Structure formats: structure tokens, C-alpha cells
Image (spheres, rainbow, N blue to C red):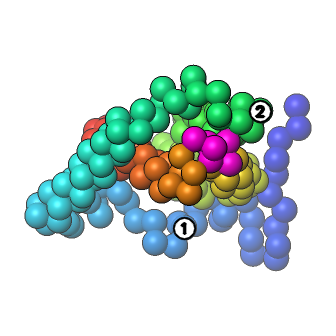
């Protein structure tokens, strides 16, 4: 089995130094969270709750999910391609956040020479550098295809409806506890 090995761009750059570097602006999540005041955290939760409630209201008012899967005006081939791209993003996210830490559990141990855990972006840059750009491209392309597939149903309000529901889904992640 062939594995990816990073090629040094200059003589000082090696795989170990690439793994040990911290991405810019990426401090420890828990320490950054503890520096914030309780009012800032409550404000963030309230903003997230507002987006989730707005997304629920929009999806209920438009019967979004019912129409997506039963309405004959939805362009099915484009809709299925968009769903496939989003499913690919879910699988790749699980690969990066679940499988890689399971496959490389010893990288985050104190005895290891590298400081990056297998679930960190620094590790992803070395081990699988093309996954994040691919996920970005497939997410953008899938979003455009989803808007195109649903356009016959809601017309020019389709991007607004899908955007509000997507933001509500993203902000719902605020309510998943951090372990």
C-alpha cells in the first residue's frame, strides 16, 4: 500500500516539522472558550437559537422537505447529483474526524514527536492535502445544483430559503456538547 509522504519544499522543511506547526489563528479550543465571558457565550447561543428557529419556521412554512422529495417540479437528476455531493462531504468529514484519529491514535500522545493530533488541520495538510479543497468545491457545486433543482418550485426565493435552512443547520451545531 502506498502512503502519501510530504516532499520538503526546502531543506529545513520536513514531515515532522510540518506536523508540529500550528495553523495560524488556531489556538486550543477549550482555552479560547474559557477566555470568553459568560455573556458572550450566552449571546452566541441566542444568535444560534434564533437561526435555528428561523430555519425551522421557513422549512415549516414552505414544506421544504416534503416538497423536495415529493414535488414533481423538482429536477430529479440534478437533485440527486446535489445529494450525492453532499453525501460525499459527509463521508469525507467522517473520514477526517472519526477514521483518521482511530487509525493514528498515537500521534497525539505525549511521547510522540509531533504535536498535531490526527483530527487537526495540520495533520490533514500533510496526510491528505487535497480533501479540504475537494470538499469545498463539491459543497459549492452541490449548493448551486440544489438551487437549480429546486428553482421551479420556489422561484427566485429558492436561494434565500435554502440559505436560511443551511445556516440554521450549521448553527444547530452550537448545541452539540464538546467532549
Q: Is residue 97 above or below residue 158?
A: above
The residue identified by callout 2 is 77
The C terminus lies in quadrant: top left
**Spatial separation of the CA atoms under disc 1 and disc 2:** 40 Å
Query: Image point 58% across, 27% down: which residue?
Result: 71
Q: Which mark is residue 78?
A: none
Q: How many marks?
A: 2
Q: Is residue 162 above or below residue 12?
A: above
Kindly report the secondary structure that dominates the magenta region of the rendered protein: helix
Residue 40 higher or lower than 126, as above or below: below
In the image shown, does 36 or 120 lie closer to the viewer?
Answer: 36
Residue 66 in the image: x percent, y percent? Answer: 48, 26
Classify mark 1: helix, strand or loop.
Answer: loop
Q: Left or right: where does residue 122 sit relative to residue 111?
A: right
Which residue is found at the position 75% from the left and 75% from the top? 12
Where does the image place residue 77, in percent across and percent down from the top left? 77, 32
Badge nearest the viewer, 1 or 2: 2
151 inside magenta stretch: yes
As rendered, which of 57 and 26 lies closer to the eye?
57
Task: Quickly name the residue at label 1.
Answer: 23
User: For this rendering, which residue is in front, 136 or 122?
Assistant: 136
The location of residue 27, given as percent across then percent down, is 40, 65
Q: Residue furthest left?
A: 39
**The magenta stretch spans which residues?**
148-153
Judge whether residue 83 can be spotted in this image. no
| Disc 2, SS | helix
Amino acid at each position: 500500500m502506498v502512503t502519501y509522504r510530504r516532499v520538503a519544499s526546502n531543506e529545513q522543511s520536513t514531515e515532522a516539522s510540518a506536523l508540529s506547526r500550528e495553523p495560524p489563528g488556531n489556538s486550543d479550543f477549550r482555552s479560547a472558550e474559557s477566555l470568553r465571558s459568560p455573556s458572550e457565550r450566552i449571546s452566541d447561543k441566542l444568535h444560534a437559537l434564533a437561526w435555528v428557529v428561523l430555519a425551522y419556521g421557513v422549512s415549516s412554512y414552505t414544506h421544504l422537505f416534503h416538497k423536495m422529495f415529493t414535488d414533481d417540479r423538482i429536477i430529479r437528476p440534478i437533485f440527486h447529483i446535489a445529494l450525492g455531493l453532499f453525501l460525499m462531504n459527509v463521508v469525507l468529514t467522517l473520514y477526517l474526524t472519526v477514521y483518521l484519529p482511530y487509525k493514528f491514535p498515537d500521534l497525539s500522545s505525549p511521547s510522540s514527536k509531533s504535536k498535531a493530533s490526527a483530527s487537526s488541520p495540520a495533520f490533514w495538510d500533510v496526510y491528505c492535502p487535497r480533501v479540504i479543497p475537494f470538499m469545498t468545491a463539491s459543497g459549492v457545486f452541490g449548493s448551486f445544483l440544489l438551487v437549480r433543482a429546486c428553482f421551479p418550485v420556489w422561484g427566485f426565493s429558492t436561494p434565500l430559503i435554502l440559505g436560511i435552512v443551511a445556516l440554521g443547520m450549521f448553527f444547530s451545531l452550537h448545541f452539540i456538547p464538546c467532549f
